[in-house]
Image (cartoon, rainbow, N blue to C red):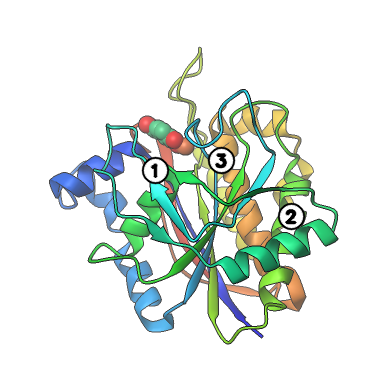
Amino acid sequence: MAQLIGGLGTSHIPAIGSAIHKGLQQDPYWKPFFDGFPPIQAWLKEKKPDVLVLFYNDHGLNFFLDKMPTFAVGAAPEYHNADEGWGIPTLPPFKGDLDLSWHIINTLVEKEFDIVTCQEMLVDHACSLPLKLFWPEGDCPVTVVPICINTVQFPLPKPGRVYAMGKAVGEAIQSWDSSKKVAVLASGGLSHQLDGERAGFINKAFDLQFLDSLESNPEWATQFSVHELVEKTGTQGVELLMWLAMRGALASGGGSKVRRVTGNYHIPISNTATAALVLEVA
Ligand code: DHB
Ligand code: FE
């Protein structure tokens, strides 16, 4: 069976792509953010996952307000990146993993998560930036299965439901008939609000408590409703649902014990509290 080796997390912000493109990693504004990544890159070099299951939220590129799935799973041979135009220049397509995609889809539907399947899927900065941050040089060496969670148009899924979906994805990975090594990734947040009266809102105390909970008390954030999460983390801070899905995957199949390999928290980049994290399945 496939091996689920661990979970990664990172914020995604289009300006990060622009900083990568301009080589600003050592610039005083950017350094505290980019310094979080060499330990993650080293972990990936050592552990060499073959596949990355990527929990992310689309921002109006592949899904718009007219059609908005709560959960959507990619089942495409490759995923084309379409950048918004103010981040990193568009990257070559990322290779999919059809066998794992369909195994996850079959498992999720069997477990009563009635997801949308996407045999074509454009991916935005939420997919392209983590891959570029983790593997800054050359092509990305893993195949990917993107799983999109709606954080754009209400109603949004409840945190508990997202955690359960992540857990079901973890069970799918661990029952996949393959000798491959799989890692799960959360792309999003942490606290941020891009518009409205509270634009620029960041909640460091909540973010740090949330990051701690991912290690030792993974269901902690499921006590909150989506509206409570918005109140505590900002309208876009709900992207932390991605981290909850990632942690849910690690909690599947008895693998609930995790070890924090490395972590970084920095505020702000643009309007966002950023975090980077690796949790290894113990
Ligand atoms: C920003 C943050 C995001 O999560 C995003 O998708 C776009 C922009 C920002 O802080 O600029
Ligand atoms: Fe975002």
For the point 43% across and 40% down, which residue is it? 273
* Disc 1 within 8 angstroms of ligand 1 (CB): yes
For the point 68% across and 77% down, which residue is it? 176
Compared to 280, does 190 lie above or below?
above
Secondary structure of the residue carrying numbered label 2: helix
Compared to 88, does 142 lie above or below?
below
Q: Quadrant of residue 272?
A: top left
For the point 50% across and 14% down, which residue is it? 196
What percent of the width, then of the height, locates residue 24?
16, 47
Q: Nearer the viewer, residue 112 or 225?
A: 112
Secondary structure of the residue carrying numbered label 3: helix
**Distance of label 3 from label 1 (alpha carbons):** 13 Å
Residue 99 left/right relative to 200: right
In the picture, the disc for residue 165 is 2
Q: Residues within 10 Å of mark 2 (few under 14, many from 20)?
A: many
- In the image, what residue type sits under mark 1? His
Compared to 80, does 251 lie above or below?
below
Q: Is residue 282 visible?
A: no
- In the image, what residue type sits under mark 2? Met
In the picture, the disc for residue 239 is 3
- In the image, what residue type sits under mark 3? Glu
What residue did someone put label 1 on?
A: 125
